[in-house]
Every structure is written in structure tokens, then in C-alpha cells.
Image (cartoon, helix red, strand yellow):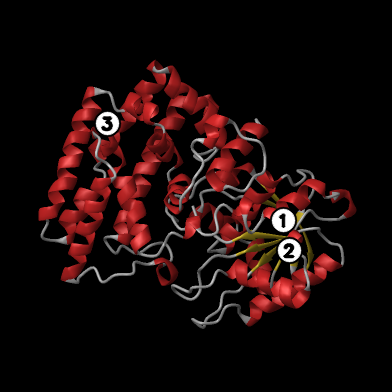
Amino acid sequence: MKTIINQIMVLVFGICFVQISKAQENFQPQTPQDWVLSKNYFANYILLKDTELSKVLFSDERVKSMLSERRKRFDDSKDCKDLACILQAFKWENNEIAILNKAVVKAYESNSHFKSFVENRLIPSNLYGLNGSKDPKEYVSRAIQQDMKNENYVIDVYAGGRNPNYPRIDSISFDVSNKSYLLLLKDVRQDVLKDTKDDYQSSFITMLTAVRLLEINERMDAAQLEPLMDGENKAALEAIKKADFNKYPYSLLLVLGAGPNVYDQPISPGGMLRARMAARAYFEGQAPFIVLSGGRVHPYKTPYIEAIEMKRYLIQNLMVPESAIILDPHARHTTTNMRNTARIMLTYGFPNDKYAIVTSSEAHINAVVNMADRCIKELGYVPYELGKRVNDVVLEFKPKLESYIIDGDEPLDP
């Protein structure tokens, strides 16, 4: 089971070095769009890439009729006079979600190829929850509905101007009241139609609209620096294979960042100090690897990726070798610092029986100690198991399998 999970996660996150099959290679993300789609809407992404699967699923006459009406509504948006009209055309309607949901359950029951996709690819991924094998039909139904609803969410935020969970850092880039904005959205419509010429591809109109909206809002953060395994994390991945973890009290050290408050500042004073704490622990032999977790977050629309700037500081100023540094350039919150590092531990080959440690300021570690309720509220689960508090600024933790589950209302780092 663990091997299957790791193989799936190569496809989704690009952070594992395990061997994958020819079938999986065909669906590995190749472009920034692929990475954003696969991380946010894995089930629909596979259907997009697997024409055979799509044609099976969308051969149902009721689905075909629904998709025909769906395409007409989208095409007619060229005549929309206001934002509400365009949003309605871009999004899935509830009855359409219900029709497609019934179709996937029917396909699972009647088609061996689709059943194989659900049982051998979708459920083992754990991306839509754990224990999916107990009710595969419910699992695939949940996955498809979640993808469709999350596509609508992106359209509401990055076309309609709805507040995201964290408006100060994640909000839309445009003035939705400006008349010229409607023209931009109609250009999005035209672009998506070029990529969905076949009838069955009407099922992907909303998903491709969502990713195009993320792109024009400069919010393709989920794709940045991917594939990490072939780039920023390549040296560390090779080192992990050879590491003797028995020589160290902990498997890795996660450094929680401190985003700058000044727009043109690459790394904050707090970031420097936390990097120094990490380097000191590394050279003292506390752990063989350092995880730097932090995306392009603070301040709003910053051009700097926090993890990259901390890595540069560790290498250039503190002489930490690149092979000891693992980047997570996507996390935007303390909850996802912990979750993304849990994903790394589960997929990079770290020992299951060994604690990792997280370090930051005393106040920040206090927050982590009491963060379970926030995790449940924002992620739907707690992605880690805490151990003892080593001192004021260091805390033990282990990863939990729940960390793989997609967080659909955070499209910049799902």
C-alpha cells in the first residue's frame, strides 16, 4: 500500500524518487498548468489526460445532453452585459454536478477501466480522504464533486472578487467593477473554448477556466519550482538515500519562516535569525536535513519565495551544504508549513519511527503547540502528531497520513 501511495504522490506533488510505471508517466505534469490542475483537481486532471476514461464517463446520454447545454451557456457568455452573467456561465450549476456524480457511480459499477482507475489510482492516493476502499463508489463521487465545487470556488474568488480565506495575501488582482474587466473575462472564455473543441471536453470548461483565472491573477503558485525532485531538491533527495539516520536524534529540522513586511525585502530579520537557529542545530548534529517552508506570500504579491531566500542565506552566509536543504516553496501558513513537511517526510523516504523537530520563535512554537483546532478548521484534519517540547523554540513532531488530503479552498497550495 505504501508503494502505491508513493507512486501516486510522484504524479501529484513531484516530491518522490520511487520508481513509477509507464502508465503513470503518461500523466505526470509537464507544464505549470498541469501542476496546478493535478494538485487541485486530481480526479478531473486524470480524466482530462485520459481520453479513454473521459469518453467512457461522458458517453451517458444524460451527461452528453447536460454538457451540450453547459457548452451553450459558456459560449453565450460572449453576450453577457454584467459580471453575474459571466460567473454563471463559467461555473458548474448544482444540477450539473448531480448529473455527473450519478454518471461516475454508474461508470464505476459498469466499466472495468473506470473501476480500475478508482481502485488503483484514486483511492490509494488518499487525496480525497482515507479509508476510501470501504466504499469506492462514495469515494469517487466525493472526489468528482469536490473538484467541481473547488473549481467554482476559484471562479468566485479570482473572477468574481469574493474574499478568499486570507484576503490580505490571496485576493483578486483586478477591479471587478471596471467595465473593461468584462472584456478580459470574455478573452478567458475565448481561450478556454480553443482548448475544449470536442463535445466530451465540455466537462473541462470550468476547470480550465479556473486555471486560466489563476494565471491572469499571477496565482500559479502551486506550480512554482516544480518539479522539485529534478531541481531544487535533487541534491537532498540523493543524500537521503545514503543517510544513516541512526546517527542523529531527529530525522529533519523544519524551519518556520517570518515573511517580510517590506515589499522589496527578500528575507526578513526574523527569517535570518531562524535560519541561524537551524544552521546551528544542523552543525550540532541534531538532524541531517533542514526543511525550509514558505512560499511567495508576504507582503501581497511579493516577487520573492521565502524558502528560496532562506536557502540562499543558509548556503551563502552560514555554509550549510545544498544537499542538506529541502525546499517547500508553496506553504502560505503555519498549518501548511507543517502539512507540507509531513508530506515530504512520507514521500521522500524518511524513517517512520523517528521524530522530526520544528523550530521558530518562542511565540511561534507556542502557536504550533495549540494549533490543532486551527488545522481542523482550515484543513479539515491535523496533519501531524506532536511529541515533547525540547525547549522554548524546538518541538517534536511526526507526520500523519491525513496530510495528503487536498485542501480545495487554498488553490495556491492545496
Q: Nearer the viewer, mark 3 or mark 1?
A: 1
Considering only vertical position in the picture, is 49 above or below 251?
above
The amino acid type, in three-letter code, at marker 2 is: Glu
> Which residue position holds label 2?
322
Q: Position of residue 374 (x, y in %)?
A: 54, 58
- Residue 18 lies, in percent from the top left, at 67, 39
Residue on which disc 3 sits: 99
Relative to the observer, which residue lies in front, 164 or 115? 115
Earlier along the polypeptide chain: callout 2 or callout 1? 1
Side of 265 where 204 appears, left or right = left
SS at mark 1? helix
Q: Looking at this view, is 316 or 391 the one in front? A: 316
Residue 89 in the image, given as x and y percentages of width and height: 19, 49
Residue 156 in view of the camera: yes
Residue 66: mark:
none
The residue carrying mark 1 is 235
Could you give the CA–CA distance between mark 2 and mark 3, rounded to whole angstroms? Answer: 51 Å
Q: Residue sitting at 38 percent across and 16 percent down?
A: 110
